[in-house]
Amino acid sequence: MPIRPEHRFFYPIDWPQLYDAIRFRRAQGRCEACARPHLQRVFHLGDGRWWDAEVLSWRDSQGRRLRQRLRNEDLLARVRVTRVVLAAAHRNHDTANNESANLAAFCQRCHMLHDRDEHQRRRWRTLFRRKALGDLFQGPYPAVPTAPAVLKPRSP
């Protein structure tokens, strides 16, 4: 995830070097949660299962090989392709804590799942703020929308 400008001062000056050390030296270019390889095109089913071309096997969302073969029904219709990009994530969501044990190399999917609660909180806050601004500048929302008046012709 890109660093927001207002959060930039939480990260140390040597963040790019630390970021690369976590992603490539420690994690060896693979997601630490699901083992997807960095900058590779991966076939996946959208539910966490993905095809590992190196070992010619399907893996689950934790990176373990699937023991059972997938059924052929609708398999081709469900397969999607994603280009995997690794990012460094803070395990405890504290951007001030940049110790190696607190950092993890996650792919886009695992990073979004890891930050799900924070994203939901930000979404709620944004919607709440927009509604408050609407109340402030446009007045309170009407309880029932008013229908336009219909003109009826007069009878003689």
Image (cartoon, rainbow, N blue to C red):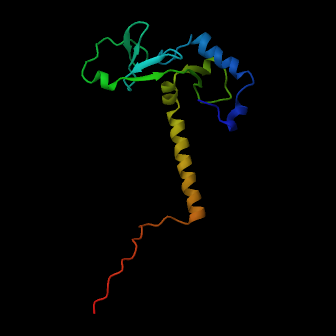
The answer to which image quadrant residue 29 occupies is: top right
**Residue at the spot x=46%, y=23% of the render?**
82
81 or 127, which lies in front? 81
**Residue at the spot x=37%, y=10% of the render?**
57
In this rendering, would 29 be left or right of 34? right
Q: Image height check: is 7 above or below 140? A: above
Question: How many marks do you count on the picture?
Answer: 0
In this rendering, would 65 be left or right of 128? left
In this rendering, would 151 be left or right of 24? left
The answer to which image quadrant residue 54 occupies is: top left
87 or 116, which lies in front? 87
34 or 16, which lies in front? 16
Q: Residue 153: x, y in percent?
A: 32, 84
The answer to which image quadrant residue 102 occupies is: top right
Q: Image height check: is 37 above or below 150? A: above
Q: Image height check: is 40 above or below 111? A: above
Q: Image height check: is 92 above or below 124? A: above
**Residue at the spot x=62%, y=16% of the render?**
22
Q: Quadrant of the C terminus?
A: bottom left
Q: In which quarter of the image is the N terminus?
A: top right
Instruction: Name, please, the residue furthest toward the top.
Output: 55
Q: Residue 122: x, y in percent?
A: 55, 42
Q: Residue 125: x, y in percent?
A: 56, 47
Instruction: Name, please, the residue furthest toward the right.
Output: 13
Q: Residue 15: x, y in percent?
A: 70, 22
